[in-house]
Amino acid sequence: MNFPFVNRTIQLQTLRHTFVFQQPSFKQSIRMARSALDEMSATGAFERTASTFRNIVSREPGSVFPVESGRYHLYISYACPWASRCLAYLKIKGLDQAIDFTSVKPVWERTKDSDEHTGWVFASSSTEEAGADLDPLNGAKSIRELYELASTNYSGKYTVPVLWDKKLKTIVNNESAEIIRMFNSEFNDIAENAALDLYPPHLQSLINEANEWIYDGINNGVYQCGFAKKQEPYDEAVQKVYKALDKCEEILSKQRYICGDQVTEADIRLFVTLIRFDEVYAVYFKCNKKLLREYPNLFNYTKDIFQIPGMSSTVNMEHIKKHYYRSHPSINPFGIIPQGPNIDYSSPHDREKFSK
Protein backbone atom coordinates (compact mmCIF):
# COMPACT_ATOMS: atom_id res chain seq x y z
CA MET A 1 0.00 0.00 0.00
CA ASN A 2 2.62 2.52 -1.04
CA PHE A 3 0.38 5.30 -2.27
CA PRO A 4 0.48 9.08 -1.77
CA PHE A 5 -0.98 10.50 1.42
CA VAL A 6 -4.15 11.79 -0.27
CA ASN A 7 -4.92 8.37 -1.66
CA ARG A 8 -4.01 6.80 1.66
CA THR A 9 -6.67 8.91 3.36
CA ILE A 10 -9.26 7.66 0.90
CA GLN A 11 -8.11 4.09 1.41
CA LEU A 12 -8.34 4.43 5.21
CA GLN A 13 -11.89 5.72 4.91
CA THR A 14 -12.71 2.59 2.93
CA LEU A 15 -11.07 0.40 5.56
CA ARG A 16 -13.07 2.12 8.28
CA HIS A 17 -16.46 1.53 6.72
CA THR A 18 -16.21 -1.71 4.75
CA PHE A 19 -16.40 -3.82 7.87
CA VAL A 20 -19.06 -1.76 9.59
CA PHE A 21 -21.51 -1.75 6.73
CA GLN A 22 -20.88 -4.96 4.85
CA GLN A 23 -23.92 -6.69 6.30
CA PRO A 24 -27.28 -4.88 6.43
CA SER A 25 -28.37 -6.66 9.59
CA PHE A 26 -25.18 -5.60 11.37
CA LYS A 27 -25.56 -2.03 10.17
CA GLN A 28 -29.03 -1.95 11.66
CA SER A 29 -27.93 -3.49 14.97
CA ILE A 30 -25.08 -1.05 15.62
CA ARG A 31 -27.28 1.93 14.84
CA MET A 32 -29.76 0.77 17.42
CA ALA A 33 -27.17 0.01 20.13
CA ARG A 34 -25.24 3.02 21.40
CA SER A 35 -24.29 1.49 24.75
CA ALA A 36 -24.43 -1.92 26.43
CA LEU A 37 -27.84 -1.11 27.91
CA ASP A 38 -29.30 -0.98 24.40
CA GLU A 39 -28.17 -4.46 23.40
CA MET A 40 -31.36 -6.32 24.17
CA SER A 41 -33.21 -8.98 22.20
CA ALA A 42 -36.99 -9.24 22.06
CA THR A 43 -36.80 -11.96 24.73
CA GLY A 44 -35.15 -9.60 27.24
CA ALA A 45 -31.70 -11.16 26.86
CA PHE A 46 -28.46 -9.18 26.57
CA GLU A 47 -26.81 -9.63 23.15
CA ARG A 48 -23.46 -7.91 22.62
CA THR A 49 -22.80 -6.40 19.20
CA ALA A 50 -19.41 -6.70 17.49
CA SER A 51 -16.66 -4.11 17.44
CA THR A 52 -16.33 -2.05 14.26
CA PHE A 53 -12.79 -0.73 13.76
CA ARG A 54 -10.71 -3.75 12.88
CA ASN A 55 -7.46 -2.58 11.30
CA ILE A 56 -4.18 -4.15 12.39
CA VAL A 57 -0.79 -2.74 13.35
CA SER A 58 1.67 -4.96 11.53
CA ARG A 59 5.40 -5.46 11.03
CA GLU A 60 4.73 -6.43 7.41
CA PRO A 61 6.36 -4.13 4.82
CA GLY A 62 3.96 -1.52 3.44
CA SER A 63 1.54 -1.77 6.36
CA VAL A 64 -0.82 1.22 6.61
CA PHE A 65 -0.32 0.95 10.37
CA PRO A 66 3.37 0.07 10.89
CA VAL A 67 5.03 -0.61 14.23
CA GLU A 68 6.54 2.63 15.53
CA SER A 69 7.42 3.59 19.08
CA GLY A 70 5.38 6.60 20.19
CA ARG A 71 2.95 6.47 17.28
CA TYR A 72 0.00 4.79 19.00
CA HIS A 73 -2.08 5.69 22.03
CA LEU A 74 -4.40 3.47 24.03
CA TYR A 75 -7.61 4.92 25.47
CA ILE A 76 -8.98 2.84 28.33
CA SER A 77 -11.24 2.77 31.34
CA TYR A 78 -9.95 1.05 34.45
CA ALA A 79 -13.55 0.02 35.04
CA CYS A 80 -13.96 -1.83 31.73
CA PRO A 81 -12.72 -5.44 31.69
CA TRP A 82 -12.16 -5.39 27.91
CA ALA A 83 -10.01 -2.26 28.12
CA SER A 84 -8.24 -3.55 31.23
CA ARG A 85 -6.95 -6.63 29.46
CA CYS A 86 -5.32 -4.37 26.85
CA LEU A 87 -3.72 -2.32 29.62
CA ALA A 88 -2.54 -5.55 31.23
CA TYR A 89 -0.72 -6.48 28.03
CA LEU A 90 0.79 -3.02 27.82
CA LYS A 91 2.21 -3.45 31.32
CA ILE A 92 3.36 -7.06 31.37
CA LYS A 93 4.85 -6.94 27.86
CA GLY A 94 6.75 -3.78 28.77
CA LEU A 95 5.13 -1.63 26.09
CA ASP A 96 4.11 1.29 28.29
CA GLN A 97 7.19 3.27 27.21
CA ALA A 98 6.35 2.80 23.52
CA ILE A 99 2.56 3.18 23.72
CA ASP A 100 1.11 5.70 26.16
CA PHE A 101 -2.42 5.49 27.50
CA THR A 102 -5.22 7.65 28.85
CA SER A 103 -8.03 6.62 31.19
CA VAL A 104 -11.50 8.14 31.16
CA LYS A 105 -13.61 8.86 34.24
CA PRO A 106 -15.34 5.80 35.70
CA VAL A 107 -18.95 7.03 35.74
CA TRP A 108 -20.82 7.54 32.49
CA GLU A 109 -21.95 11.09 31.77
CA ARG A 110 -23.71 12.93 28.97
CA THR A 111 -21.44 12.87 25.92
CA LYS A 112 -23.20 15.76 24.14
CA ASP A 113 -25.60 18.48 25.10
CA SER A 114 -27.67 17.74 21.98
CA ASP A 115 -28.88 14.26 23.02
CA GLU A 116 -29.35 12.01 26.04
CA HIS A 117 -26.56 9.52 25.32
CA THR A 118 -24.33 8.74 28.31
CA GLY A 119 -20.92 7.15 28.03
CA TRP A 120 -17.21 7.46 28.71
CA VAL A 121 -15.95 11.00 29.26
CA PHE A 122 -12.54 12.46 30.02
CA ALA A 123 -11.65 14.42 33.13
CA SER A 124 -12.02 18.18 32.76
CA SER A 125 -8.86 18.85 34.78
CA SER A 126 -5.83 16.97 36.07
CA THR A 127 -7.21 17.10 39.60
CA GLU A 128 -10.88 16.26 38.98
CA GLU A 129 -10.60 12.54 39.72
CA ALA A 130 -7.62 10.38 40.62
CA GLY A 131 -6.79 7.96 37.84
CA ALA A 132 -8.78 9.86 35.19
CA ASP A 133 -7.10 12.02 32.57
CA LEU A 134 -7.75 14.77 30.08
CA ASP A 135 -7.44 13.74 26.44
CA PRO A 136 -3.83 14.72 25.65
CA LEU A 137 -4.06 14.29 21.87
CA ASN A 138 -7.31 15.72 20.56
CA GLY A 139 -8.74 17.67 23.47
CA ALA A 140 -11.85 15.49 23.21
CA LYS A 141 -14.44 15.66 25.96
CA SER A 142 -15.61 12.09 25.46
CA ILE A 143 -14.74 8.81 23.73
CA ARG A 144 -17.68 9.53 21.48
CA GLU A 145 -15.81 12.52 20.04
CA LEU A 146 -12.91 10.25 19.08
CA TYR A 147 -15.25 8.00 17.12
CA GLU A 148 -16.74 11.01 15.38
CA LEU A 149 -13.26 12.31 14.53
CA ALA A 150 -12.38 8.94 13.01
CA SER A 151 -15.67 8.52 11.12
CA THR A 152 -18.10 11.33 10.36
CA ASN A 153 -21.06 8.95 9.90
CA TYR A 154 -20.32 6.43 12.66
CA SER A 155 -23.51 5.20 14.34
CA GLY A 156 -22.52 2.41 16.73
CA LYS A 157 -21.36 2.18 20.34
CA TYR A 158 -18.64 4.44 21.71
CA THR A 159 -16.58 1.84 23.53
CA VAL A 160 -13.15 1.42 25.05
CA PRO A 161 -10.51 0.26 24.41
CA VAL A 162 -9.52 2.48 21.51
CA LEU A 163 -6.13 2.08 19.85
CA TRP A 164 -5.44 5.47 18.25
CA ASP A 165 -2.95 6.35 15.53
CA LYS A 166 -1.44 9.76 16.35
CA LYS A 167 0.05 10.21 12.87
CA LEU A 168 -3.10 9.50 10.84
CA LYS A 169 -5.41 10.75 13.62
CA THR A 170 -7.79 7.84 13.47
CA ILE A 171 -8.91 4.75 15.34
CA VAL A 172 -6.92 1.69 14.37
CA ASN A 173 -8.88 -0.88 16.33
CA ASN A 174 -11.48 -1.07 19.11
CA GLU A 175 -11.62 -4.85 19.51
CA SER A 176 -9.70 -5.86 22.62
CA ALA A 177 -9.18 -9.45 21.45
CA GLU A 178 -7.27 -8.15 18.42
CA ILE A 179 -5.41 -5.40 20.26
CA ILE A 180 -3.92 -7.86 22.75
CA ARG A 181 -2.74 -10.10 19.91
CA MET A 182 -0.99 -7.10 18.34
CA PHE A 183 0.62 -6.21 21.66
CA ASN A 184 1.73 -9.81 22.13
CA SER A 185 3.61 -10.22 18.86
CA GLU A 186 3.68 -7.26 16.46
CA PHE A 187 5.42 -4.89 18.89
CA ASN A 188 8.12 -7.28 20.10
CA ASP A 189 10.89 -5.22 18.51
CA ILE A 190 10.11 -2.38 20.91
CA ALA A 191 8.76 -4.36 23.90
CA GLU A 192 10.87 -4.54 27.05
CA ASN A 193 9.54 -8.03 27.78
CA ALA A 194 9.50 -9.41 24.24
CA ALA A 195 10.34 -12.93 25.43
CA LEU A 196 6.94 -13.26 27.09
CA ASP A 197 4.63 -14.98 24.59
CA LEU A 198 1.06 -15.20 25.80
CA TYR A 199 -0.08 -16.94 22.61
CA PRO A 200 2.66 -19.53 21.95
CA PRO A 201 2.23 -21.68 18.83
CA HIS A 202 2.07 -25.00 20.68
CA LEU A 203 -0.84 -23.80 22.85
CA GLN A 204 -2.84 -21.75 20.35
CA SER A 205 -5.57 -24.29 19.68
CA LEU A 206 -6.02 -24.88 23.42
CA ILE A 207 -6.06 -21.12 24.11
CA ASN A 208 -8.63 -20.54 21.37
CA GLU A 209 -10.85 -23.25 22.78
CA ALA A 210 -10.53 -21.87 26.33
CA ASN A 211 -11.22 -18.31 25.16
CA GLU A 212 -14.46 -19.43 23.56
CA TRP A 213 -16.03 -21.05 26.60
CA ILE A 214 -14.59 -18.49 29.02
CA TYR A 215 -16.00 -15.62 26.98
CA ASP A 216 -19.40 -17.22 26.52
CA GLY A 217 -19.80 -18.51 30.05
CA ILE A 218 -17.92 -15.96 32.16
CA ASN A 219 -16.71 -12.74 30.46
CA ASN A 220 -19.99 -12.14 28.65
CA GLY A 221 -22.05 -14.44 30.84
CA VAL A 222 -22.01 -12.09 33.82
CA TYR A 223 -23.35 -9.29 31.60
CA GLN A 224 -26.11 -11.57 30.36
CA CYS A 225 -27.07 -12.04 34.01
CA GLY A 226 -26.82 -8.39 34.96
CA PHE A 227 -28.55 -6.83 31.96
CA ALA A 228 -31.31 -9.43 31.56
CA LYS A 229 -34.76 -7.88 31.70
CA LYS A 230 -36.70 -11.09 32.17
CA GLN A 231 -36.37 -14.03 34.54
CA GLU A 232 -35.88 -16.77 31.96
CA PRO A 233 -32.83 -15.29 30.19
CA TYR A 234 -31.31 -14.48 33.58
CA ASP A 235 -31.85 -18.06 34.77
CA GLU A 236 -30.22 -19.43 31.62
CA ALA A 237 -27.28 -17.04 31.90
CA VAL A 238 -26.56 -17.68 35.57
CA GLN A 239 -26.54 -21.44 35.03
CA LYS A 240 -24.01 -20.92 32.24
CA VAL A 241 -21.81 -18.71 34.43
CA TYR A 242 -21.54 -21.25 37.21
CA LYS A 243 -21.04 -24.17 34.88
CA ALA A 244 -18.02 -22.35 33.45
CA LEU A 245 -16.71 -21.33 36.89
CA ASP A 246 -17.00 -24.93 38.07
CA LYS A 247 -15.04 -26.01 35.00
CA CYS A 248 -12.31 -23.49 35.82
CA GLU A 249 -12.14 -24.70 39.40
CA GLU A 250 -11.70 -28.30 38.22
CA ILE A 251 -8.96 -27.38 35.73
CA LEU A 252 -7.12 -25.28 38.31
CA SER A 253 -7.18 -28.10 40.84
CA LYS A 254 -4.69 -29.91 38.58
CA GLN A 255 -2.54 -27.18 37.04
CA ARG A 256 -1.40 -23.64 37.77
CA TYR A 257 -2.94 -21.93 34.74
CA ILE A 258 -5.91 -22.52 32.44
CA CYS A 259 -3.82 -23.92 29.59
CA GLY A 260 -1.07 -25.65 31.55
CA ASP A 261 2.07 -24.59 33.37
CA GLN A 262 2.53 -21.14 31.81
CA VAL A 263 0.44 -18.00 31.86
CA THR A 264 -1.31 -17.31 28.56
CA GLU A 265 -3.82 -15.04 26.92
CA ALA A 266 -6.64 -17.19 28.32
CA ASP A 267 -5.56 -16.34 31.88
CA ILE A 268 -5.52 -12.58 31.26
CA ARG A 269 -8.94 -12.71 29.61
CA LEU A 270 -10.36 -14.71 32.52
CA PHE A 271 -8.69 -12.60 35.21
CA VAL A 272 -10.39 -9.32 34.28
CA THR A 273 -13.78 -10.85 35.07
CA LEU A 274 -12.68 -12.72 38.19
CA ILE A 275 -11.15 -9.61 39.79
CA ARG A 276 -14.55 -7.90 39.51
CA PHE A 277 -16.64 -10.87 40.57
CA ASP A 278 -17.10 -10.58 44.33
CA GLU A 279 -16.80 -6.77 44.37
CA VAL A 280 -19.37 -6.12 41.63
CA TYR A 281 -20.89 -9.03 39.73
CA ALA A 282 -22.04 -11.01 42.77
CA VAL A 283 -24.18 -8.07 43.91
CA TYR A 284 -24.82 -5.87 40.91
CA PHE A 285 -25.22 -8.59 38.28
CA LYS A 286 -26.97 -11.03 40.63
CA CYS A 287 -24.20 -13.65 40.37
CA ASN A 288 -24.50 -14.58 44.03
CA LYS A 289 -25.04 -18.32 43.81
CA LYS A 290 -21.43 -18.78 44.88
CA LEU A 291 -18.71 -16.21 45.50
CA LEU A 292 -15.27 -16.37 43.95
CA ARG A 293 -13.66 -16.75 47.36
CA GLU A 294 -15.74 -19.90 47.90
CA TYR A 295 -13.74 -21.48 45.07
CA PRO A 296 -10.35 -22.22 46.66
CA ASN A 297 -8.47 -22.80 43.40
CA LEU A 298 -10.05 -19.93 41.48
CA PHE A 299 -9.56 -17.51 44.34
CA ASN A 300 -5.88 -18.33 44.79
CA TYR A 301 -5.42 -18.32 41.01
CA THR A 302 -6.87 -14.80 40.83
CA LYS A 303 -4.34 -13.65 43.46
CA ASP A 304 -1.59 -15.38 41.49
CA ILE A 305 -2.41 -13.48 38.27
CA PHE A 306 -2.87 -10.21 40.19
CA GLN A 307 0.66 -10.58 41.53
CA ILE A 308 2.31 -10.90 38.09
CA PRO A 309 4.59 -7.82 37.86
CA GLY A 310 2.61 -4.97 36.35
CA MET A 311 -0.85 -6.50 36.76
CA SER A 312 -1.83 -4.86 40.04
CA SER A 313 -1.41 -1.40 38.47
CA THR A 314 -4.18 -2.24 35.99
CA VAL A 315 -6.76 -2.82 38.75
CA ASN A 316 -8.40 0.32 40.12
CA MET A 317 -11.20 -1.03 42.28
CA GLU A 318 -12.51 2.43 43.10
CA HIS A 319 -13.08 3.11 39.40
CA ILE A 320 -14.55 -0.36 38.89
CA LYS A 321 -17.12 0.01 41.66
CA LYS A 322 -17.99 3.61 40.80
CA HIS A 323 -18.64 2.71 37.19
CA TYR A 324 -20.93 -0.25 37.69
CA TYR A 325 -22.92 1.08 40.61
CA ARG A 326 -23.38 4.61 39.24
CA SER A 327 -23.50 4.34 35.44
CA HIS A 328 -26.73 2.39 35.00
CA PRO A 329 -29.55 4.17 36.85
CA SER A 330 -32.12 1.73 35.46
CA ILE A 331 -30.39 -1.01 37.51
CA ASN A 332 -29.22 0.98 40.56
CA PRO A 333 -31.28 4.21 40.57
CA PHE A 334 -29.78 5.68 43.74
CA GLY A 335 -26.17 4.98 42.78
CA ILE A 336 -25.28 3.52 46.18
CA ILE A 337 -21.88 1.76 46.22
CA PRO A 338 -21.50 -1.19 48.63
CA GLN A 339 -18.62 -0.79 51.08
CA GLY A 340 -17.22 -4.32 50.84
CA PRO A 341 -15.77 -6.81 50.54
CA ASN A 342 -12.39 -5.08 49.89
CA ILE A 343 -10.44 -8.26 49.14
CA ASP A 344 -6.66 -8.20 49.44
CA TYR A 345 -5.45 -9.90 46.27
CA SER A 346 -1.84 -9.25 47.22
CA SER A 347 -2.07 -11.74 50.08
CA PRO A 348 -0.29 -15.13 49.80
CA HIS A 349 -1.62 -17.88 47.55
CA ASP A 350 -0.78 -21.55 47.07
CA ARG A 351 -0.35 -21.75 43.30
CA GLU A 352 3.42 -22.31 43.43
CA LYS A 353 2.70 -25.92 44.39
CA PHE A 354 2.12 -26.69 40.71
CA SER A 355 5.57 -25.39 39.78
CA LYS A 356 7.49 -27.85 41.93
Image (cartoon, rainbow, N blue to C red):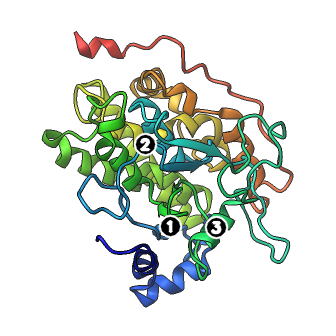
Please identify, in this view, whether the residue under mark 1 or under mark 2 is nearer the observer. Answer: 2
Q: Spatial distance from mark 3 to mark 1, Cα to Cα?
A: 10 Å
Q: Earlier in the sequence, mark 2 or mark 3?
A: 3
User: In the rendered image, is residue 42 in sight?
Assistant: no
> Which residue is identified by label 1?
48
Q: Earlier in the sequence, mark 1 or mark 2?
A: 1
Amino acid type at mark 2: Ser
45 on left or right of 317: left
Q: Nearer the viewer, residue 134 or 181?
A: 134
Q: Spatial distance from mark 1 to mark 2, Cα to Cα?
A: 33 Å
Mark 3: few/some/many CA within 10 Å (<14, 14-19, 20+): some
Amino acid type at mark 1: Arg
Determine whether the residue tagged by mark 2 lies in a helix, strand or loop: loop
Determine whether the residue tagged by mark 3 lies in a helix, strand or loop: loop
Q: Where does residue 13 sit, x and y in percent of width and height?
A: 46, 78
Determine whether the residue tagged by mark 1 lies in a helix, strand or loop: loop
Q: Spatial distance from mark 2 to mark 3, Cα to Cα?
A: 32 Å
Mark 1: few/some/many CA within 10 Å (<14, 14-19, 20+): some
The furthest residue to the bottom: 24
Q: Tell me the residue at 20%/39% (across/down).
A: 200
Amino acid type at mark 3: Ser
> Which residue is identified by label 2?
69
Q: Where does residue 10 sit, x and y in percent of width and height?
A: 44, 81
Please identify, in this view, whether the residue under mark 3 or under mark 1 is nearer the observer. Answer: 3
Instruction: Answer above or below: position of 343 versus 175.
Output: above
> Which residue is identified by label 3?
35
Image quadrant holding the C terminus, namely: top left
User: In the rendered image, is residue 249 in sight?
Assistant: yes
Q: Where does residue 61 sit, x and y in percent of width and height?
A: 23, 58
Please identify, in this view, whether the residue under mark 2 or under mark 3 is nearer the observer. Answer: 2
Instruction: Answer above or below: position of 145 versus 207.
Output: below
